[in-house]
Each structure stands twice: as C-alpha cells, then as structure tokens.
Image (cartoon, rainbow, N blue to C red):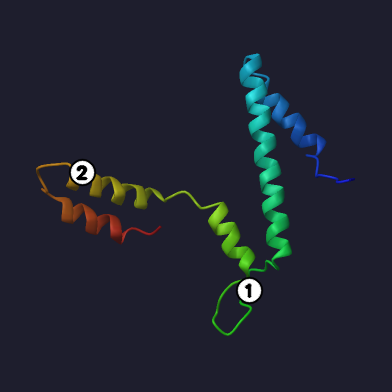
Amino acid sequence: MNQSYPVPPPELLEQWSTEANRQDCVSYTKSIAIDAAQWGADQELEACCEWLGYAPVVYNDNDDLHPGSYLRDARRPKPPTLKEQALEALEHILHNSSTELGAETIRRALEALDG
C-alpha cells in the first residue's frame, strides 16, 4: 500500500518552528502538533470540497451552491461577529437579571449596526 500525503512546505515548517521556539519543550511540541494537525485538516477539507465539485457559483435551478460550499461552511464556521456576540450577551443578561432597563434600546442599537 503506497499512499502519499501532502507535506507542509518548508517555509511553513520554519514558521511553525520559529513561533513555537519561544516556548518550553512540551509547549513547543504541542504547538507544532496543533499547527500540523490544523494544516492537514485544512488540506483534507480542500480536497473533499474539490472532489464534491466546489465552485462558488450556482449549479442548479434551486439556486443551491455546490456541496463543497456547504461542507466548508459546516466544517469551518466563521466566528460570530462582535454584534452577534453583543446580542447574545444581552440575551444572557436579560434571562439572568432582574431588570430590563434599557435592554430594548440596546437591542435596537445593536441590530441597526452593520455586520
């Protein structure tokens, strides 16, 4: 069985080594392992998206995107925006506080923001 796996480019290995070198030995090893695992996972995700026929264009009558787009969105979700985080924090405060003073004003202001 002869399988070849992608290997990180030398520049990336050097970058990881330089960044991790500022830490103790255990942290250094963990840092390199985490970086390598993330890189490998990203490579695999891109290969899967390509295999599924990823393209950021519409491909059928239902205006659906290629399955690769959905896979990437599901496996690498974008972090919530500051606005989304603030609205979530506001909900938490409302559910765990005895006062609602100004909450609706804050909510409307947050919802009016872009992003």
Q: Is residue 97 left or right of residue 23?
A: left
In three-dimensional space, the C-alpha distance between marks 1 and 2, rounded to whole angstroms, equals: 41 Å
Q: Position of residue 99 (x, y in %)?
A: 9, 44
Amino acid at circle 1? Val
Q: Nearer the viewer, residue 57 or 66?
A: 66
Q: Is residue 47 left or right of residue 27?
A: right
The local secondary structure at tag 1 comes to loop
Tell which residue pokes out farthest to the front in this image.
1
Please name the residue that numbered disc 1 is placed on: 57
Please name the residue that numbered disc 2 is placed on: 93
Q: Position of residue 100 (x, y in %)?
A: 12, 48
Q: Position of residue 76 (x, y in %)?
A: 56, 51
Q: Is residue 12 left or right of residue 24?
A: right
| 1 or 2: tag closer to the N-terminus | 1
Residue beneath the point at 67% across and 30% down: 33
Q: Residues within 10 Å of mark 1 (few under 14, many from 20)?
A: few
Q: Position of residue 40 (x, y in %)?
A: 71, 43
How many marks the image carries: the answer is 2
Q: Do the residues under discs 1 and 2 have CB atoms within 8 angstroms?
A: no
The local secondary structure at tag 2 comes to helix
Residue beneath the point at 21% across and 43% down: 93
> In the image, is residue 4 above or below residue 104?
above
User: Which quarter of the rendering shows the C terminus?
Assistant: bottom left
Residue beneath the point at 68% across and 66% down: 54
Q: Nearer the viewer, residue 6 or 89?
A: 6
Residue beneath the point at 81% across and 40% down: 7
Tell which residue pokes out farthest to the bottom in this image.
61
User: Which quarter of the rendering shows the N terminus?
Assistant: top right
Q: Nearer the viewer, residue 93 or 5?
A: 5
Amino acid at circle 2? Ile
Q: Residues within 10 Å of mark 2 (few under 14, many from 20)?
A: some
The quadrant in which residue 22 appears is top right
